[in-house]
Image (cartoon, rainbow, N blue to C red):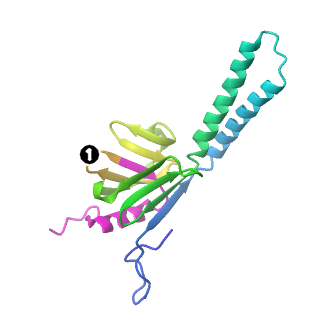
Amino acid sequence: MTDHPGRAAHGSTQAPSTVWTGKATNRAQWLLAFVGAACLALGVEIALDSNWTSGVAPLVMSVVGCVAAGLLMLYGTLAFVHVAVKVDGDALEVRCGHMGLPRRRILLTHVVGAEFVPRVTPRQWGGWGYRWRPEQGTAVVVRRGEALLLRLGDGMSFTVTVDNAEAAVRFIRDRLRLPAAGKPSEA
């Protein structure tokens, strides 16, 4: 993580940071990725060592089914094993997995509020991954725990599970000059 503005020691010559970074990881999804790799290997094994006497169609369907299920499970889990969040002066950027896909960039000019959510669970959003629920908005959920919730100008919201989400909320509020939660604005 980077240092945050206003956190430098008194009298320090260190300039305040203009970027906040955070991440979250879910090691349990490696088990699901292993299951996906096993499905993929089973499809290859069936294709190479086929003693099917009932015809070619069941063989092709079995191979294609195992390979497709394996690839979908592998990509679906590896894409959401971890998430990286970066907030700079212009935007919040979320990158998932090792390739950084899917990716979402939200301009801070579209943000009207930032909140810390102490506990988000995959069950609240219908599972792990990139989620959308009409009554809740959009979320990137890679594990249960603390999260950052952004209220957007179009009435939608965006939630992302990330370590040290409270610091991200402070950083965004400082950038947008929003009042801290529970404190009246100084207008």
Tell me where the magenta segment starts and ends, as one range. 158-187
Where's residue 73, x and y in %?
Answer: 62, 36
Q: Residue furthest top?
A: 54
Where residue 146 appears, as percent x and y from the top left, is 45, 54
**Residue drawn at x 44%, y 40% as measured from the top left:** 131
Vertical arrangement, residue 104 with respect to residue 131, above or below: below
Q: Report helix, strand or loop for mark 1.
A: loop
63 drawn magenta: no
**Compared to 57, does 181 lie above or below?**
below
| Residue at horizontal 24 percent and vertical 65 percent from the top | 183
Which residue matches tag 1? 155
Q: Measuring from the top left, give residue 133's x and y in whole percent.
A: 38, 37
User: As drawn, is 155 to the left or to the right of 6?
Assistant: left
Q: Amino acid at mark 1?
A: Gly
Asked which quadrant contains residue 78, the reply is: top right
Q: Quadrant of the C terminus?
A: bottom left
- Within the image, what quadrant is residue 90 found in? bottom left
- Please rate how many residues cluster around mark 1, counting C-alpha atoms within 10 Å: few if below 14, some from 14 to 19, many from 20: few
Q: Residue furthest bottom?
A: 11
Q: Inspect this view and state whether residue 37 appears.
A: yes
The magenta stretch spans residue 160: yes
